[in-house]
């Protein structure tokens, strides 16, 4: 997932205030990336431990790729919320 984020929103752009991306565009990028994680969570019925591990692995990889801490925290929180929210069965 982190590699998908890099393709759509590289750290060079994310960490450069002169190349700001709109919040709406950034949300769209993250939603596209998290759609795959949401599907994986539905198919594999992730419990709280596996969701936490997924979030931590994602956070560490974004940190290693050079994203600033604020973006990493926001993206990780969004991932956990997407995975948790979409676990409920659809009616």
Image (spheres, rainbow, N blue to C red):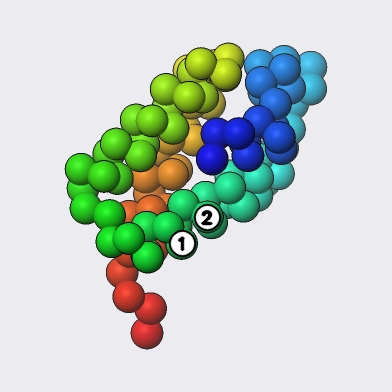
In the image, 44 versus 35, the foreground residue is: 44
Q: Which residue is mark 2?
A: 36
Q: Position of residue 7 (x, y in %)?
A: 71, 35
Q: Residue at x 73, y 22 (%)?
A: 13
Relative to 7, say whether 11 is above or below: above
Contact flag, marks 1 and 2 (Cβ < 8 Å): yes
Residue 39, labelled with which disc? 1
Residue at 54% of width from left, 40% of height from top?
Answer: 1
**Count of numbered tags:** 2
Q: Position of residue 14 (x, y in %)?
A: 67, 23
Q: Residue at x 66, y 30 (%)?
A: 6
State the image coordinates of residue 24 (x, y, percent, origin top left).
Answer: 67, 46
Q: Is residue 11 or residue 17 the one in the foreground?
A: 11
Q: Secondary structure at mark 1?
A: helix
Looking at the image, the residue that sits furthest to the front is 44
Q: Is residue 11 above or below residue 9?
A: above
Quadrant position of residue 25: top right
Is residue 79 shown left or right of residue 9?
left
């Amino acid at each position: 997932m982190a590699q998908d984020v890099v393709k759509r929103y590289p750290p060079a752009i994310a960490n450069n205030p002169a190349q700001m991306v709109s919040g709406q565009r950034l949300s769209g990028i993250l939603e596209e990336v998290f759609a795959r994680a949401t599907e994986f969570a539905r198919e594999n019925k992730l419990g709280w431990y596996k969701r936490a591990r997924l979030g931590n692995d994602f956070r560490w990889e974004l940190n290693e790729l050079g994203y600033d801490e604020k973006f990493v925290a926001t993206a990780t929180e969004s991932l956990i919320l997407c995975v948790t929210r979409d676990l409920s069965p659809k009616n």
